[in-house]
Structures are given as C-alpha cells and as structure tokens.
Image (spheres, rainbow, N blue to C red):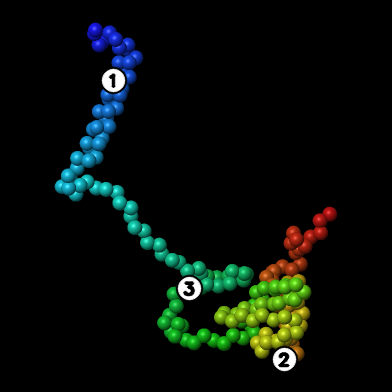
Amino acid sequence: MKLGKAWSSEHKLLAMACGLAMVGLVLTYWQIHSLSIADTSKTAFNSPKGYEFIEVAPPPGNIFIEGRRIASRDKNKDEEARPPKEATTSDFVLASIIERGHKSIAIFIADNKRISLSPGQQDPLIGKLILLRGNQATTSLADGTEKQWKLFPISNPGKPNKEETPSS
C-alpha cells in the first residue's frame, strides 16, 4: 500500500501546516532559551523607568476673594523667623453656618484660629453673636458697634442669581 495515495490532498495540507507550526514553535523556544550569560549582557532589555513625583503645594491665598493674586511661594528666611502675629477682628471671616436641630452655630476662621459661636455667646475678638439669619451673622463688640458678617459675599447684590428669581 502506498502512503501517498491513501492521503487526500486536504490531509496533506493539514499535515504540512502542523509541521510548519511545530518547526516555528521549536525555533522560537530555541531562540528564547539558547542565550548564554555572555549574550544577555549584549542584549538590551527594556526595564521600567523609575519616576519621581514632585509634590507641589497649592498656591496660598483665599480663592473666594475677588481680584485674588497668587502670592509668591518663596519666602525669605527673615519672614520665616518672625513669630506669627496675633489675630484681630479684621483677620476673621465667616466660614460656615451650621444648623443642628434648632441650634445654629457660626464658625469664624483666621489664619490659625477657629471660633464657633451660637447666638448669645461671646468671644473677646469677635464680640457677642446677636443674630444668625440666612447667610449673615451680626456681632456686637464691647463698645456697642455692630458688625455684619456675610457667608460668601457677592460683589453685585443688586443682580439676583438664578436661585433668587421666582419661577413663573
């Protein structure tokens, strides 16, 4: 019996394709694993590059002030050596009004100091908190002068924003 006649042309093509695939696998395996130690020193491998992340501090300053300028980050040694100044009433801003149940609390913030007051409470720097209404707080100093504090003051109070306009 002859081997060539028993196989059809489809079987011969399939056998040739399998043979070529096996030869390709053997050559690939041989190419990968036949490198000696001397050959690996000549081969350049792509190793991942180590990246260093530089932390950048956010620019100082209040973002809610109109006409804000970014202050310089470079400080002189003389400025760092100076002790921090004591906070005055003009340094404080109304940062938040919190309502817990029926109790309202106003929070005033200066550089490194935070004061929270309820209506009727008093602080030597802020004064006595008289009234909390909406986004405003009213304080009275020891000499009797009253000061209005606004939470997020707007520059043009005459122009209503979308939330204040009645829908028709």
| Marks 2 and 3, the one that precedes in the sequence | 3
Q: Is residue 102 above or below residue 23?
A: below
Identify the residue at the far left of this view: 38
Where residue 144 sits, quadrant-wise, is bottom right
Q: Which residue is painted at 66% across and 89% down in the image?
A: 124
The reply to whether discs 3 and 1 touch (Cβ–Cβ < 8 Å) is no
Q: Is residue 39 above or below residue 83?
A: above
Q: Secondary structure at mark 3?
A: loop
Mark 3, residues whose alpha carbon is within 10 Å: few (<14), some, or many (≥20)? few
Identify the residue at the far front of this view: 1
Q: Which residue is painted at 27% across and 25% down in the image?
A: 20
Q: Which residue is mark 1?
A: 16
Q: Which residue is mark 2?
A: 142
**Is 56 on the left-hand or right-hand side of 163?**
left
Q: Position of residue 118 (x, y in %)?
A: 72, 80
Q: CA distance from mark 3 to mark 1?
A: 75 Å
Q: Position of residue 9 (x, y in %)?
A: 32, 12
Where residue 33 sits, quadrant-wise, is top left
Q: Nearer the viewer, residue 46 or 87?
A: 46
Q: Which mark is residue 72?
A: 3
